[in-house]
Amino acid sequence: MPVVSSPDQIKTEILSYLPLHMQRLLNNLKPEEYQLLEEIRLRCGQPLLVRIGERELAVGEDRLTSNLLHGYRVKQEDICRVIASISDNSLYAFEEDIRRGFITIPGGHRVGLAGQVILKQNHIELIKNFASLCFRVAREVKGCARSVMPSIFNTPQILNNTLIVSPPRCGKTTLLRDITRCISAGSPRPGMNVAVVDERSEIAGCYHGVPQLDVGPRTDILDGCPKDIGMMMAIRSLSPQVIITDEIGTQADAGAVMECIHAGVHIISTAHAESLEELRRRPILRKLMADGVFKLVIILSRRNGPGNIDQVIRWDAP
């Protein structure tokens, strides 16, 4: 399958935000390593780390190494330079993103933030004194949903409400994105109006509200919007045939899902779980499954790499 994010793209869209000496270290990656690059982690006083496929490696002066003692040690000034770079020297303009714990950069890549969290009335007011950053590479794997699309559709214009289930780093969002693209573009069925409630800016990877990743021509995106609020907004104002969102897990999410069903809108979403058995142990998801909300369950793993489809289950509620 074609994977978007070539070495040149990664250098332009991600490495350009790093100090020059870090760019020089990471320029030593091989083309095939860029293709598998998932994360770049900077922790103050700790080695510069990269995750390449299943391997987590330290970045040394002339090579990648599994020996963390040989990795370049990230300095506080490195963190400060990166923060200034990704915020265009204006942290004030990114206050809302910082409160959510990440900043999205061009290309749809996300930079996770960690540091001193300041609370006000049990809500995050701001994060300051940043101590670590995590660049997560956004990728498109166009065509990865091809095998599940026939199961998602019952008829050309009626689809099964679908839940994609897996632990973290197994490709849920990548699969969800390609499903969105296929439904919106009309591949292989006629295209449908889709609303994406992208609370964590992962599905469409919006930068200044504009999707950086291909989610199709008939797709409207509510970026950074809480799922329960966004689903209601979409029903009222966007006339979607399908609503797509990620990580259903709270009672408010479940209530919004039920409102969508009652409004005749189809739902495709994801959930964190290792297996169907673990899914059943989560009370909110168990209730949705028992009520027959989701008719199709797709279970992913990393058994043969991210995006491995373990099971496609047609769900009939007891």
Image (spheres, rainbow, N blue to C red):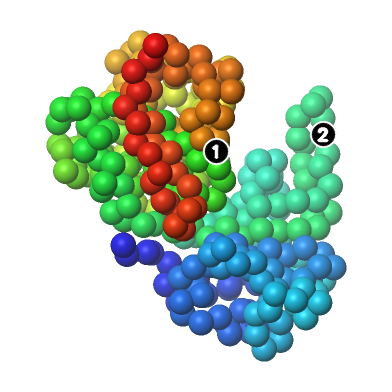
Q: Is residue 9 visible?
A: no
Q: Residue at x 81, y 25 (%)?
A: 121
The amino acid marked with disc number 1 is Glu
Identity of the residue drawn at 77% across and 63% down:
43
Label 2 environment density (alpha carbons within 10 Å; few <14, some 14–19, many ≥20)? few
Near-viewer residue (258 or 14): 258
Quarter of the image holding residue 268? Answer: top left
Q: Nearer the viewer, mark 1 or mark 2?
A: 1
Residue at the disc numbered 2:
119
Side of 80 where 197 appears, left or right: left
Q: Does residue 259 sit above or below 308 in this rendering?
A: above
Q: Residue 246: which numbered mark, if any?
A: none
Identity of the residue drawn at 31% across and 62% down: 1
Q: CA distance from mark 1 to mark 2?
A: 32 Å
| Horizontal arrangement in the rendering, residue 89 relative to residue 140 (left or right) | right
Q: Amino acid at mark 2?
A: Leu
Please state the horizontal and vertical placement of residue 200, each as a whole percent of the image.
55, 41
Q: Quadrant of the C terminus?
A: top left
Q: Answer with mark 1 or mark 2, whichever residue precedes in sequence.
A: 2
- At x 79%, y 26%, the residue is 122
Image position, residue 307 (x, y; %): 42, 51
* SS of the residue under disc 2: strand
Q: Which mark is residue 274?
A: 1
